[in-house]
Image (cartoon, rainbow, N blue to C red):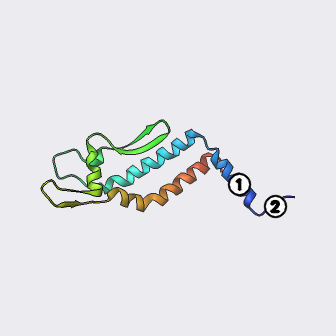
Amino acid sequence: MNNHNGFLDAIEEINTLLKVGQTVQLDVLEEAANYFVEVLKPNIPITKRNKEHMRNRLKVVIKKDVVQVVFDGDAWYWHLVEHGHRKVNGGKVKGRHFVQNTWDKYGDKIADMMANKIIEKMGG
């Protein structure tokens, strides 16, 4: 007796999605990370000091099975700009939240893009 209530089909689809290979996952994650870099760059504040700009230090790094968007080298200060900090001589610098605001704006689109790419690569 076959029960066509949709649960069996859903389970089969979920099992198929779980079998996505690591290469496909890394490809999709890398593509999503590159897209995030593309939309993040215009939102990164430009320094007023005579330093290299953070947007020039933004890149995608792949280490084994992990894909990261990072500020390379001496751009460690992105964290201070993002979250704010206390000044040495007193007072506080307010955070700009450029990374979080960009993620809030594009996060759902990136998730949809990743899901669609996985389905596409699986032949769906």
Instruction: Please report the residue visible at 12 percent of the width from the left and 56 percent of the height from the top.
Output: 89
Which quarter of the image is occupied by the N terminus?
A: bottom right
Q: Is residue 61 above or below residue 35?
A: above
Instruction: Please report the residue visible at 61 percent of the width from the left and 44 percent of the height from the top.
Output: 20
Q: Nearer the viewer, residue 31 or 111?
A: 111
Q: Is residue 123 left or right of residue 67?
A: right
Instruction: Please report the residue visible at 44 percent of the width from the left and 48 percent of the height from the top.
Output: 33
Mark 1 is on which residue type?
A: Ile
**Crowdedness near tag 2: few (<14), some (14–19) or many (≥20) residues, C-alpha within 10 Å:** few
Instruction: Please report the residue visible at 30 percent of the width from the left and 43 percent of the height from the top.
Output: 57
Q: Is residue 51 above or below residue 92?
A: above
Residue 92 quadrant: bottom left
Which one is earlier in the sequence, the residue at label 2 or at label 1? 2
Q: Which mark is residue 3?
A: 2
Tell me where residue 50 appears, x and y as whole percent. Answer: 16, 46
Q: Nearer the viewer, residue 103 or 109?
A: 103
**Crowdedness near tag 1: few (<14), some (14–19) or many (≥20) residues, C-alpha within 10 Å:** few
- Kindly give the residue lying farthest to the bottom in the view shown: 5
Q: Nearer the viewer, residue 107 or 77?
A: 77
Q: Is residue 45 left or right of residue 117?
A: left
Tell me where residue 28 appears, x and y as whole percent. Answer: 52, 46
- Kindly give the residue lying farthest to the right in the view shown: 1
Tell me where residue 37 appears, x and y as whole percent. Answer: 38, 49
Could you say whether the residue bearing mark 1 is in a helix, strand or loop? helix
Q: Is residue 72 left or right of residue 65?
A: left
Alpha carbons under labels 2 and 1: distance apart: 13 Å
Q: Is residue 67 above or below residue 10?
A: above
Q: Is residue 78 left or right of residue 34?
A: left
Residue 3 quadrant: bottom right
Q: Which mark is residue 11?
A: 1
Could you say whether the residue bearing mark 2 is in a helix, strand or loop? loop
Mark 2 is on which residue type?
A: Asn
